[in-house]
Every structure is written in structure tokens, then in C-alpha cells.
Image (cartoon, grey):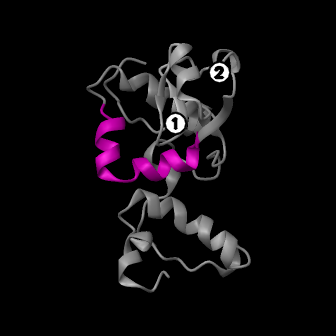
Amino acid sequence: LLSTPEYDYLLDCSNAFALFSIPKLQSTCCGGTGNHKNICPDAPKPYEAICTSEQDFQTDAVLSYACKGTNAQVCTDAGGKYNEDEGKCEDIDTDSPDKCGEITGFTYEPDSTCEQMGFLLSTPEYASAYLDCSNPAILPYIYQSQSTCCGGAGNHKDICPDAPK
């Protein structure tokens, strides 16, 4: 499958999806990390976008949660907006499981990890949007991501040196 031209995008090192998927695929298929081929040797590591040290990077830490289910009507009745493609009830409070727990048939589930975010931020199109220091709405996202993912304030990369802390 991966050797056919129509699936080249799965090994495209400039594609955030591929950067995230390749190690997962290798872990499933190759019999351990010692057998992984370094397919993207020049690709940025997930920690590099927001942290200074790989050693303390919390790869599997949950960065965000989603309220997932299949009943669009129940979601909208609860004041949410149903995302059919992802099976999520959006525009509700997902900082805690409380609001989601009130929606029949929906569960509060991990939605993204630090590793996934790191791979996304290693691509220019995502980095330009999510690391835009001129956008005050982005600063809390950066700080929260660093607090969750970097393993301590001493490992936070100074992404926005002129922004108020």
C-alpha cells in the first residue's frame, strides 16, 4: 500500500498528518522502536515548537477534550453545535466533563495530545496561525500548551518574547 503512488502523502514529511502517523504505524508494524526506519530525519520533533527540551516533553499528555456522541439533536438541544464529521458537540464548555455529562449519549473524551499538537505546529501553515504572537487570543493557548506539555516552566520556549506574561 505505501509503495503505491496514490498513497505517497502518507510518507510526505511536510504533512503534519504523516509526521504523526508514521511513528504510530511503525509501532504497530515494525516490532519495536529499534526497528523503526528514520523516514523523516530532517522533520522537526514535536517538542520543538513550544518547548526547549525533548527529555521533559509530555508526549501523551492530553491537551484538549471533546464531547463526543452521535445524536445531533440532543447536542443542539443542550446549546451545542454538532460536528457530524468528527462526532463532537462543539460550542459547549469542555474544560471539565460537567456540561458534556449532562448530554445524553455523549462522553467526555481526550481529543488531542501534546504529540499531535507538536506535529501540527511543525508545519508552517499551522504554526503561522497557532503561534501568532500578534493575536492576543492565541497567547493563552500557547501558555496552556506549554504548561501541559513542556514538563515545567524551565522548559518553555520563549515564543513571544515581547508579549506580556
The residue that appears at 42% across and 35% down in the rendered structure is 158
Instruction: Answer whether residue 102 is magenta in the image.
Output: no
Numbered mark located on residue 100 in the image: 2
Numbered mark located on residue 98 in the image: none
- Main SS category, magenta section: helix
Q: Position of residue 73 (x, y in %)?
A: 54, 23
**Can you say whether 39 is above or below 123 in the image?**
below
SS assignment at label 2: helix
**Mark 1 = which residue?**
156
**Can you say whether 87 is above or below 78 in the image?**
below
Examine the rendering and report whether any part of residue 150 can be seen.
no
Q: Amino acid at mark 2?
A: Cys
Q: Amino acid at mark 1?
A: His
- Judging depth in this view, the residue of 97 and 150 nearest the camera is 97
Of all residues, the one furthest to the left in this rendering is 134
Instruction: Answer whether residue 125 is magenta in the image.
Output: yes
Q: Which residues are magenta?
A: 112-132
Mark 1 vs 2, N-terminal side: 2
The residue that appears at 44% across and 46% down in the rendered structure is 49
Picture quarter with the C terminus: top left
- Spatial separation of the CA atoms under disc 1 and disc 2: 31 Å
